[in-house]
Amino acid sequence: MSKKPWYPFFPADFRSSPRVQTLTLEQEACLRRLLDIQWLSEDCTIPDNMQMHCSWTSNAMQEQCTRDAVLQFFPIIEDGKRANLRLRELFFKASDTSRERKKAAETRWNKPKTKSKKKKDANASVLQCDSDSDSDSNNTPISPNGDFEKFWNAYPRKSGKGKAWESWDKIKPNAQIQSRILEAITEQSKTEQWKKDKGQYIPFPATWLNQKRWEDSPEIVLAEKQEEYDWSEYKY
């Protein structure tokens, strides 16, 4: 059984489909049941013996008619199996996103920790190491650095600027990494984690930099990506 217990459903598309509009209430119920069964299968297909999962109708005379009406939504694909193409597309997109996030997390946590060399800085006393707390003042003296300021202005949580500068200075990101950092902030700002409860779950900027969180694959809610994907070939 699939490890993903839910799937995105688009009622507006479903209800506006001409094919759906021709279904009886009983046929529509069979269709919805088969969509559930397909999503919960390991390979997102309809099992061979569908009769075990779906009673097509209580009227034996109408069974073939109901079966034909519903199966038009599940064309035959490889190996003679049936599947709803739109649901199958969503299934593999969700699987790819899950694998990418898992791989990014494993890469981040499995990297060997190295001791950073202590840097002698005559102006170190100027840099105040303020604590990572939301009550942190944003007036910490910082050595001028336009690239860091671009990061700071883009990052939505304005806490611990001194610590963030230390992390930035330790990483010394090149132009390519800086570009990826800004892209990642934009992407991750759209995730549920960063938007939830007025952003209280957004990592502190120093933590985000130290853990190289720009390498994460952002959790994109598929429903939010609906308008960016051409579903014309995968109507219900």
Image (cartoon, grey):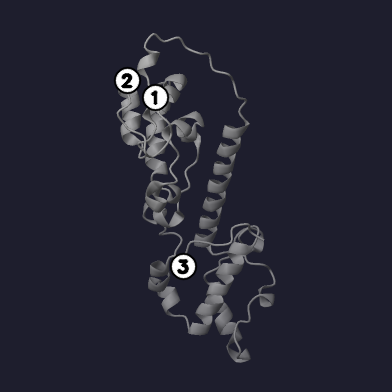
Residue type beneath disc 1: Trp
Identify residue for label 2: 145
Give SS at disc 1.
Answer: helix
Q: Crowding near pointer 2: few (<14 within 10 Å), some, many (20+)?
A: few
C-alpha gap between disc 1 and disc 2: 9 Å
Which of 219 and 68 lies nearest the eye of the viewer?
219
Identify residue for label 3: 236
Q: What x and y, as percent, mark residue 65?
A: 56, 83
Q: How many marks?
A: 3
> Which of disc 2 and disc 1 is earlier in sequence?
2
Establish if 93 lies above or below 135.
Answer: below
C-alpha gap between disc 3 and disc 2: 53 Å
Establish if 141 lies above or below 93.
Answer: above
Identity of the residue drawn at 41% across and 46% down: 200
> Which of disc 2 and disc 3 is earlier in sequence?
2
Identity of the residue drawn at 52% across and 61% down: 7
| Residue 222 lies in quadrant | bottom left
Give SS at disc 3.
Answer: loop
In this rendering, the label closer to the viewer, 3 or 2: 2
Q: Crowding near pointer 1: few (<14 within 10 Å), some, many (20+)?
A: many
Q: What x and y, as percent, mark residue 201?
A: 45, 46
Residue type beneath disc 2: Asn
Q: Is residue 93 left or right of residue 18?
A: right
Where is the N terminus found, in terms of image quarters? bottom right
Q: Which mark is residue 165?
A: 1
C-alpha gap between disc 3 and disc 1: 51 Å
Residue type beneath disc 3: Tyr
Q: What x and y, as percent, mark residue 93?
A: 52, 51
